[in-house]
Amino acid sequence: MVKRCEWATSSPEMQRYHDEVWGRPEYDEQKLFELLCLETYQAGLSWQTVLKKQAAFEAAFHNFDVEAVAVMKPAEVDQLMTNAAIIRNRRKLEATVNNAQALVNWSEEMNFSTWLWAFVGNQPIRHQLTSANQIPGTTDLAQHISREMKKHGFKFVGPKTVYSFLQAAGLVNDHILTCDWAPENQRERG
């Protein structure tokens, strides 16, 4: 029998996200951008809601192509506000365009992915958790990265959103110890 983290058992979408995305190290800039965007949409809503609308978001935002999203005009955001297939929160939609622009205008010597992974020494942080109740809502690291991202012009990147993003992108691995996707159990599964 497959053992997953408690939160991932409510639907096939949640199981797929848990099994294929959450906690897996991601380095691709476009995929990191997508994960960040999805986390901003989740703020104040259930993750289930976001997953059900993911395909519509991909269509609305050019498959999260950073360059294409960065040049979206206010009129396009206005049009998205009429799209019932997505989460129609103007601030979140505008943050998506803004954050794409922040990535396009990135001025660090290293790219965003390398910059982000440097915060964890290029190694995922592994918390030894025995239940979902132990998963923190945020950490000092997430608060620090949130402040740094805001300095780079990102919006809608509060500490809770950033922590969820770090989990999604695999910089933090919070699979509980009994989960088949915990790193300790992955080695056993081969």
Image (cartoon, helix red, strand yellow):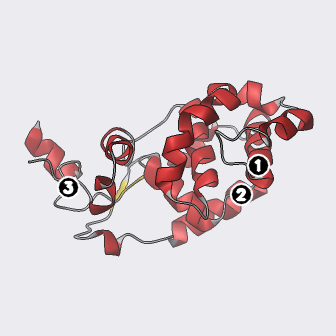
Q: Which mark is residue 140?
A: none
Amino acid type of the residue that numbered disc 3 sits on in the rendered structure: Cys
List x then y, in percent, for residue 31: 54, 34
Q: Which mark is residue 156?
A: 2
List x then y, in percent, for residue 9: 28, 54
Q: Nearer the viewer, residue 120 or 129?
A: 129
Q: CA distance from mark 2 to mark 3?
A: 31 Å
First in sequence: mark 3 vs mark 1: 1
Residue located 23% across and 48% down the image: 181
Amino acid type of the residue that numbered disc 2 sits on in the rendered structure: Phe
Residue located 33% across and 43% down the image: 12
Residue that label 1 marks: 95
* Residue 29 placement: quadrant: top right
First in sequence: mark 2 vs mark 3: 2
Image quadrant where one finds the C terminus = top left
Q: Residues within 10 Å of mark 1 (few under 14, many from 20)?
A: some
Count the labels in the image: 3
Label 2 with label 1: CB-CB less than 8 Å: yes
Element carrying mark 3: loop
Residue that label 3 marks: 179
Residue 130 appears in view? yes
Q: Nearer the viewer, residue 148 or 169?
A: 169
Q: CA distance from mark 3 to mark 1?
A: 34 Å
Element carrying mark 1: helix
